[in-house]
Amino acid sequence: DSFNARGSNWVMTAISEVIICHVPYLPMLGSSYLETPYNLALKHCLINVKAEDSYCFLYSVLAGIRVDVQKHQNHVLQYKRRLDELNYDGLEFPLDVRHVKRFEIMNEDISVNVILYSISDPKDGFYPIYVTPHRQRRHHVNLLLLEDGDRYHYTTITSMSRLTHGRTKAHGKCWVCDYCLHPFSS
């Protein structure tokens, strides 16, 4: 079309071949429990709720907003009895990252960020895959989605500074950008 519009007088007479490539869509969603990688466990920056069902997203959100749970933070029973505090009607579990936005709409006082970490390839680092547009909500939760091949598991980040430690030469606490995960020291 662009050649004809400029007066080339070219004419297409036939299409000899069309190639259509497709791949199956595999959504990133929490599935079964994954052990916290050793290098992250040493940082003491995560709560990894040991649940064998598909509600790891809900347990991780509850771990982030329930500061009154001091002991046994990794035990699922601490959060299972508090599931009625969240509205998750109509959501399918394990929860696809695309549906975090729906969860935030249903729970107007909670905002959630999701960061991806690959266990099988830890040198790639951390990637924000969902950053909330809601900045002034009562509760904010940062979740780390652990990935190991085709398995995923949500965990709660308790300290972004500890999680990203080692990216700066600073020795104290730092502030971390939600969009690029770059740490800034004072």
Image: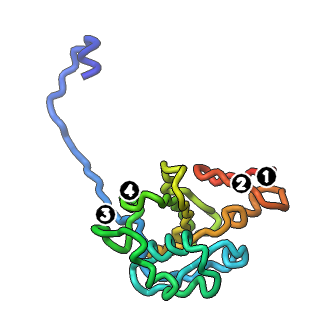
Q: Is residue 78 above or below residue 148?
A: below
Q: Is residue 44 above or below residue 11?
A: below
109 vs 14, nearest the viewer: 109
Q: Are marks 1 and 3 in contact (CB under 8 Å)?
A: no
Q: Which residue is mark 4?
A: 105
Residue that lies at the very extreme toward the left in this rendered image: 13
> What is the CA distance from the residue labelled 1 to the residue labelled 4?
33 Å
Closer to viewer: mark 4 or mark 3: 4
Q: Is residue 42 above or below residue 116?
A: below
Badge 3 crowding class, 10 Å Cα cut-off, few under 14, some 14 to 19, many 20 or more, is few
Give me the residue at 72% from left, 78% from top: 42
Image location (x, y in percent) of residue 150: 43, 73
Q: Secondary structure at mark 2?
A: strand
Q: Are marks 4 and 3 in contact (CB under 8 Å)?
A: no
Q: Which residue is mark 2?
A: 175
Give me the residue at 44% from left, 84% from top: 81
Q: Is residue 177 above or below residue 119?
A: above
- The amino acid type of the residue labelled 4 equals Ile
Closer to viewer: mark 1 or mark 4: 4
Q: Which residue is mark 3?
A: 24
